[in-house]
Amino acid sequence: MQFAYLGSGSRGNAAIIEAGQTTLILDCGFTVKETLARLIRLERDGSEIDGILVTHEHSDHVAGVGALARRLGIPVWATSGTFLASEKRMGKLPAMHIIDPAQAFSIGDIEVSPFTVPHDAREPVQFVFSDGNVRLGILTDVGQSTPHIEAMLSGCDSLALECNHDRKMLMEGPYPAALKSRVAGGQGHLDNVTAARLLSRLDGSRLQHLVAVHLSETNNTPALARHALSTEAGCDPDFIQVADQEEGLPWHAIA
């Protein structure tokens, strides 16, 4: 099993997960042209993609989903709430599968386990992916941790964890007061320290990869995210990878 990021941040998000003969895209906040260009960097052309999973309806995650699905002729998976909230933006789809947030399901060789998260969207979920041997947990766009989130992510072999902002940078930065309140709120985004505290409550004994994702270009830096996570994980900061907005993240194999 392996994963990579096409890009991660407020200007667009997309991850790619592969296991066996199955390739999935998680979210697509980029145009079709940009998505295909970023896939080429990862030595993919889109023909291998079996489906797109959508976490929620915000434009940086869903803007390119419909167009990509139509271009490649592939199905889309989303919760009922996410589908209803993004139906007009996505347009007509080749096929649409509704996710039960409490029910795991399989797409080819990948088992997909959704879980609910507190975020200011209609019915948002995040996911754990497995090939039956290893588990990849992905958590972004979440305002606070919950026991359910921690139970789902504990014991993963690889983890992509939101480190959206440094709280001091956010509060002293240029955002309007209402936006600061939304980002820092319980249905907003995880700051570095809160993400690190969440990490400290997980069983990380199997972790091969720890990736900081969805960093704000205005209110965070890779160094601050790495410092917060590595302090809690008790590891060298260089162990923490960062998914970049422009460069994404190269392939990481999970053994």
Image (cartoon, grey):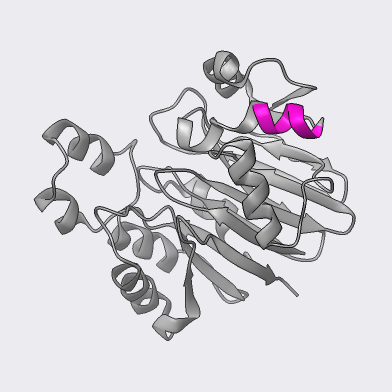
Residue furthest bottom in the image: 236
Where residue 43 sits, quadrant-wise, is bottom right
- Residue 202 is situated, as x and y percent measured from the top left of the image, at 49, 64
> Main SS of the magenta segment?
helix
Location of the N terminus by quadrant is: bottom right
Q: Viewed as shown, does residue 173 lie left or right of 155? A: left
Tell me, yes or no, whether the highlighted magenta stretch contains residue 93.
Answer: no
Q: Residue at x 21, y 34 (%)?
A: 179
Please say if 75 is above or below 217.
above
In the depicted view, which residue is nearer to us: 162 or 62? 62
In the depicted view, which residue is nearer to us: 19 or 194? 19
Q: Residue at x 47, y 48 (%)?
A: 140
- Residue 65 is situated, as x and y percent measured from the top left of the image, at 63, 31
Location of the C terminus by quadrant is: bottom right
Q: Viewed as shown, does residue 54 lie left or right of 192? A: right
Q: Viewed as shown, does residue 117 lie left or right of 1? A: left
Residue numbers of the magenta segment: 67-72
* Viewer can see residue 157: no
Tell me, yes or no, whether the highlighted magenta stretch contains residue 71.
Answer: yes
* Viewer can see residue 117: yes
- Residue 70 is situated, as x and y percent measured from the top left of the image, at 75, 26
Where residue 81 sits, quadrant-wise, is top right
